[in-house]
Amino acid sequence: MTLATWITFFLACWAISLSPGPGAIAAMTAGLNQGFRRGYFTVLGLVLGIWTQMIIVVIGLGAIIKASETAFTAMKFLGAAYLIWIGI
């Protein structure tokens, strides 16, 4: 890689890391529009979502699904049912 490519990459990473993500924007919007309590529970929901994802990774759900065709099919149907339930 050339020095110009490295500098461009560094600047892009820097800009992306400084911009707030969708979770931060949702928490700020909820806090500003509905108050501290709503903002607090929004952040709590975001943290619980991250913890849930980490627990799923730790227990090795990906390896289980890869090893079992039945588990993979069940996960697909559960995912489809969830998307239908939330209205997508």
Image (cartoon, rainbow, N blue to C red):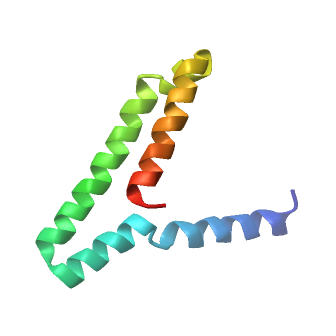
Work out whether 21 lies above or below 64. below
> Residue furthest toward the right?
2
Residue 31 locus on image (x, y percent)? 21, 76
Closer-to-camera residue (1/28): 28
Work out whether 67 lies above or below 18. above
Closer-to-camera residue (39/75): 75
Left or right: 78 as drawn, with respect to 43: right
Left or right: 28 as drawn, with respect to 25: left
Closer-to-camera residue (16/10): 16
Left or right: 80 as drawn, with respect to 41: right
Work out whether 29 lies above or below 38. below
Quarter holding the N terminus is bottom right
> Residue furthest toward the bottom?
33
The residue at the point 54 percent across, 36 percent down is 76
The residue at the point 17 percent across, 70 percent down is 38
Work out whether 49 lies above or below 55. below
Left or right: 22 as drawn, with respect to 4: left
Residue 67 locus on image (x, y percent)? 60, 15
* Quadrant of residue 34 within the rendered picture: bottom left
* Quadrant of residue 51 within the rendered picture: top left
